[in-house]
Image (cartoon, rainbow, N blue to C red):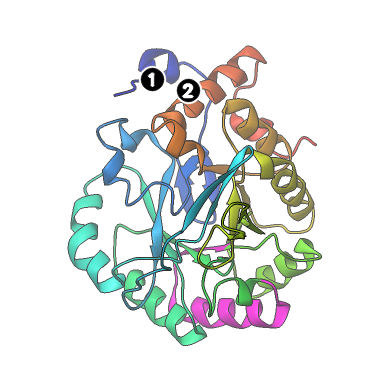
């Protein structure tokens, strides 16, 4: 298990940030779909050190996901078409919540759905869980046939789902946006107007891979979501653009593989970051990044991480 230098850690800059009413002990979270429910990583790190854990995508009803092949390696990244496979919100409430509510960090549920009504019903159930202080509304998954990215690429659809969920959920509401749009700032401003407390971006980029020997697409769904280091410049630009367009906090993700990557997002305007694909390469990476952000701040004589947010 990785242990950060806690004594050194305590003497360094203040890492606390706020997302709506949610206070994070540091700006590093783990991205949905890359960290399970968090419990799976307890053999590798002390997960209570994290600012937050976004659990895997959760839907109102159990969902099987897509058939294989569902993953493919690409240059400097990976494609996935898992399709939000999960056992549904009731399973989460009965089997996962009793375990994670004992852990001293923020667990945030990534909520997905095929219809506005499904999003709202799932959020309503989670709203009753005392130890879940926030949800991340996933209106940007490119790997499902209904819902997902369909909501995130239309201003009308995005505002409708946020408006209805806001009526059913009274804690911190984070909305995860799709990069597969022409102008991310317009959608960001629209959902801010409907009561979103924060925006997370980016989700994966719609892409594909081909098997030249079989002469057909590698993924069963033909297209999937591209993630990893290759998408970082796009994610960084969208975070910077969105942070200048809205007043609510922006959470940056997409290709963060090391502490310097995370610092880039903070400088570009992100209040917090999420670590995704890097978790598959190094299950200890998220805690290492916390430690190294603290060292970066100390090296450059910053007293608080807030001092570097949005410098650019």
Left or right of 167? Residue 211 is right
SS under mark 1: loop
Q: Where does label 2 land, which residue? A: 291
Res 25 visible: no
Q: Secondary structure at mark 2?
A: helix
Q: Which x, y percent locates residue 129?
A: 29, 66
Residue 10 occupies quadrant: top left
State the predominant SS element of the stretch in magenta. helix
Q: Which quadrant is home to the C terminus?
A: top right
Sequence-first disc among 1 and 2 = 1
For image coordinates 52% across by 31% down, the residue present is 15
Quadrant hosting residue 66:
bottom left
Task: Say if 62 sits above or below 311 in the image.
Answer: below
Specify whether 181 is left or right of 22.
right
Q: How many marks?
A: 2
On screen, residue 136 versus residue 196, left or right, reads left
Q: Mark 1 touching mark 2, by CB under 8 A?
A: yes
Q: Is residue 103 left or right of residue 154?
A: left
Residue 113 lies in the magenta-colored region: no
Q: Nearer the viewer, residue 42 or 162?
A: 42
Residue 307: x and y in percent read 67, 31
Residue 74 vs residue 87, the one in the foreground: 74
Magenta span covers which residues?
A: 153-175
Counting from the top left corner in percent of width and height, residue 56 is at 39, 57
The residue carrying mark 1 is: 4
């Amino acid at each position: 298990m990785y242990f950060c230098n806690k004594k050194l850690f305590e003497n360094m800059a203040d890492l606390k940030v706020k997302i709506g009413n949610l206070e994070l002990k540091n700006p590093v979270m783990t991205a949905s779909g890359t960290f399970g429910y968090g419990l799976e990583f307890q053999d590798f790190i002390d997960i209570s050190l994290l600012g937050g854990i976004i659990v895997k995508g959760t839907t109102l009803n159990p969902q099987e996901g897509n058939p294989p092949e569902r993953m493919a390696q690409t240059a400097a990244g990976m494609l996935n078409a898992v399709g939000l496979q999960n056992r549904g919100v009731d399973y989460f409430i009965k089997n996962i919540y009793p375990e994670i509510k004992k852990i001293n960090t923020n667990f945030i549920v990534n909520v997905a759905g095929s219809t506005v009504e499904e999003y709202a019903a799932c959020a309503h159930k989670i709203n009753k869980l005392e130890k879940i202080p926030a949800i991340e509304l996933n209106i940007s998954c490119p790997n499902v046939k209904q819902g997902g990215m369909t909501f995130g690429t239309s201003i009308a659809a995005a505002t409708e789902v946020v408006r209805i969920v806001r009526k059913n959920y009274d804690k911190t509401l984070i909305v995860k946006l799709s990069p597969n749009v022409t102008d991310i700032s317009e959608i960001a401003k629209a959902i801010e107007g409907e009561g979103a407390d924060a925006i997370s971006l980016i989700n994966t980029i719609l892409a594909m891979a081909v098997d030249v020997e079989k002469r057909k697409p590698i993924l069963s769904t033909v297209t999937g979501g591209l993630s990893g280091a290759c998408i970082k410049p796009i994610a960084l630009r969208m975070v910077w653009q969105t942070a200048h367009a809205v007043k609510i906090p922006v959470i940056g993700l997409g290709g963060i593989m090391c502490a310097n990557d995370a610092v880039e997002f903070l400088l570009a305007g992100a209040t917090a970051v999420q670590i995704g694909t890097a978790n598959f390469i190094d299950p200890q990476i998220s805690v290492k990044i916390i430690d190294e952000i603290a060292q970066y701040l100390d090296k450059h004589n910053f007293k608080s991480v807030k001092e570097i947010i949005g410098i650019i």
